[in-house]
Amino acid sequence: MHAVISLGGSILAPEKLDIKYTQEVAAELKKLVEKGHSIMVVTGGGARARNYIEAARQLKASEAYCDVIGIEVTRLNARILISALGNSAYPEPAKNFEEAVKFYRPGRIVVMGGTHIGHTTDSVSAMLAEYTGADLLIIATDVDGIYTSDPKIDPKAKKIDKISAKEFSKFALEHGQVEAGSTFVVDPHAAKIIERSKIRTVVINGRKLNEFERIIEGKSHTGTEILPR
Ligand code: UTP
């Protein structure tokens, strides 16, 4: 099984880098590779990206320049995960999809951050999944899946267990934002790619580490299943 995993900055890189979580997620990824799965990971920017973007914005940098800063931070976070993966990962974060393919060998995890301005690492992971013909895209974030509204703000928010890619894309357009550092769980551009690629996509809580394997093996899980059709 070839899976692309989007590891949101909210779990990998909160205010203070979470060493224990990084070690645990790296161990889980290595286990999947040892079982013969091919794994590529896209790391998000997290709190540090937002801090840097906010500072640059206050200093009157353009939105595009803020995006470039965000991309640099996602690549820095990729290096943190690579550090934990050791010999199981290619030592450099791939800067684009061509490099991701070049760096890949069976048994070796490729890690990358952002690519170009105007989207988020969720989009990068959806495009990487499409480009490399992945069987599965897992979007690991800090909530249990897609909710009807933001569960951190709205106590009435309900988790959606299953949603069609088409409906999901409509939903993301209604709820998403496009400015640098925006926080909706999946950005609308990523949702569009997910819809067109027809790749099975699951949004999960990245802290529930045993869910990765369950999803890859087609077992029940607690996330949101985005159905290709
Ligand atoms: P993230 O992918 O982490 O964005 O990239 P996010 O959705 O705001 O945050 P998470 O998912 O909670 O971690 C951080 C920022 O870097 C820029 C964008 O400004 C984005 O908001 N970025 C990232 C790009 O412009 N292009 C990319 O390919 C990736």
Image: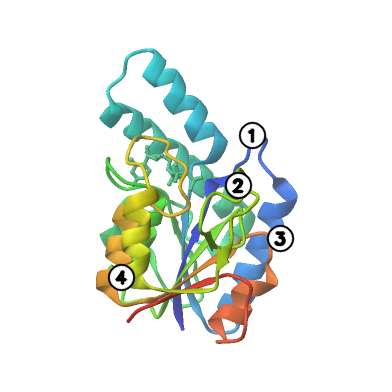
Q: Which numbered marker is on residue 24?
A: 3
Q: Is residue 102 visible?
A: no
3 and 4 marks in contact (CB < 8 Å): no
Q: Position of residue 171 (x, y in %)?
A: 37, 59
Q: Which residue lies furthest to the right in this view?
A: 20
Q: Which residue lies furthest to the top in this view?
A: 59
Circle 4 SS class: helix
Q: Considering only order in the chain, which callout, 2 or 3, is on the residue closer to the N terminus?
A: 3
Q: Quadrant of ligand 1?
A: top left
Local crowd size for mark 2, using a 10 Å CA cut-off: few (<14), some (14–19), many (≥20)? few
Residue that appears at 60% across and 59% down? 85
Q: Where is residue 7 in the image (x, y as percent from the top left)?
A: 53, 56
Q: Considering only order in the chain, which callout, 2 or 1, is on the residue closer to the N terminus?
A: 1
Q: What residue type is labelled 1?
A: Glu
Say above or below: 58 vs 64: above
| Label 1 sits on residue | 15
Q: Which of labels 1 and 3 is toward the front?
A: 1
Q: Considering only order in the chain, which callout, 2 or 4, is on the residue closer to the N terminus?
A: 2
1 and 2 marks in contact (CB < 8 Å): no
Local crowd size for mark 4, using a 10 Å CA cut-off: few (<14), some (14–19), many (≥20)? some
**Distance Cα–Cα, label 1 vs label 4:** 34 Å
**Distance Cα–Cα, label 4 vs label 2:** 25 Å
The quarter of the picture where the C terminus appears is bottom left
Q: Which of labels 3 and 2 is toward the front?
A: 2
Residue nearest the observer in this picture, 55 or 225 = 225
